[in-house]
Amino acid sequence: MGDELYHELSMVTESLPKSYLIKQSRAKLNATYHIERTPGIYPGASLNFTSTICDHVKELLRKTPELKGRKIQVKLSGDGARMSRTTNFMMMSLTLLQLNESVMSPKHNRTVVIINGPEKYETLKTSLFPFFNEGNQLISKGTQSIDGENVQLEFFLGGDMKFLLMIFGLSSATADYK
């Protein structure tokens, strides 16, 4: 619903919050995350990978301070999803493996990239280039400064068989040749 329509509805309905309050809340939410467009021909959006990891690790260390000084394990996952006959999405997410609760729970997975495009190697190569570049830099450093302290990071890659083969540039599991 657009701002103008909501404003008109809030004028005639007493139970709805005023439109200026909704706009203020939206601005606060937008200031929380910096969302950028992904490169390539397929439309997509991404969060800053490093700052998302930093936020996630800060939250983990605040909840479980006994993990300070220990290596933090980060799992990167990817998958494709077919929404309709003509619409496909590819997503990349991260989760921290030290969480005491189930790491498979959706509330602990942070989506960092989503692309409206086919689940193909070319889509990964063009649209996720900045994401993989930033991830490779973090992996090669092995540490990240969070609140003035260097935190050691260890990365793992996850996904279904199709995604893992695709990310390594290989054909399907039943292919005769790569």
Image: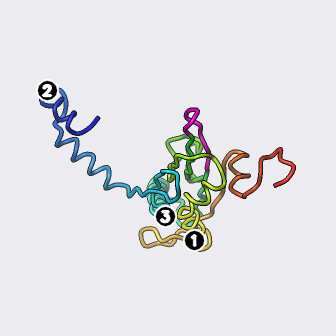
Q: Residue at x 62, y 63 (%)?
A: 154
Q: Are marks 1 and 3 in contact (CB under 8 Å)?
A: no
Residue 9, image x, y percentages: 18, 29
Residue 165, image x, y percentages: 74, 52
Q: Residue 14, which numbered label?
A: 2
Residue 138, image x, y percentages: 56, 69
Q: Residue 50, which numbered label?
A: 3
Disc 2 is placed on an element classified as loop
C-alpha distance separating marks 1 and 2: 53 Å
Q: Residue at x 61, y 49 (%)?
A: 78
Q: Quadrant of residue 37?
A: bottom left
Disc 1 is placed on an element classified as helix
Residue 51, image x, y percentages: 45, 62
Classify 51 as above or below 111.
Answer: below
- The mark nearer the N terminus, 1 or 2, is 2
- The mark nearer the N terminus, 2 or 3, is 2
Question: Foreground residue, 55 or 117?
Answer: 117
Classify 107 as above or below 150.
Answer: above
Q: Residue 137, which numbered label?
A: 1
Question: Foreground residue, 56 or 170?
Answer: 170
Question: Foreground residue, 152 or 121?
Answer: 121
- The mark nearer the N terminus, 1 or 3, is 3
Is residue 79 magenta-colored?
Answer: yes
Q: Quadrant of residue 104?
A: top right
Is residue 68 magenta-colored?
Answer: no
**Count of numbered circles in the view:** 3
Q: Amino acid at mark 1?
A: Gln
Read off the magenta span: 78-87
User: Which quadrant holds the C terminus?
Assistant: bottom right
Q: Is residue 30 left or right of residue 132?
A: left
Q: Quadrant of residue 8?
A: top left
Q: Amino acid at mark 2?
A: Glu
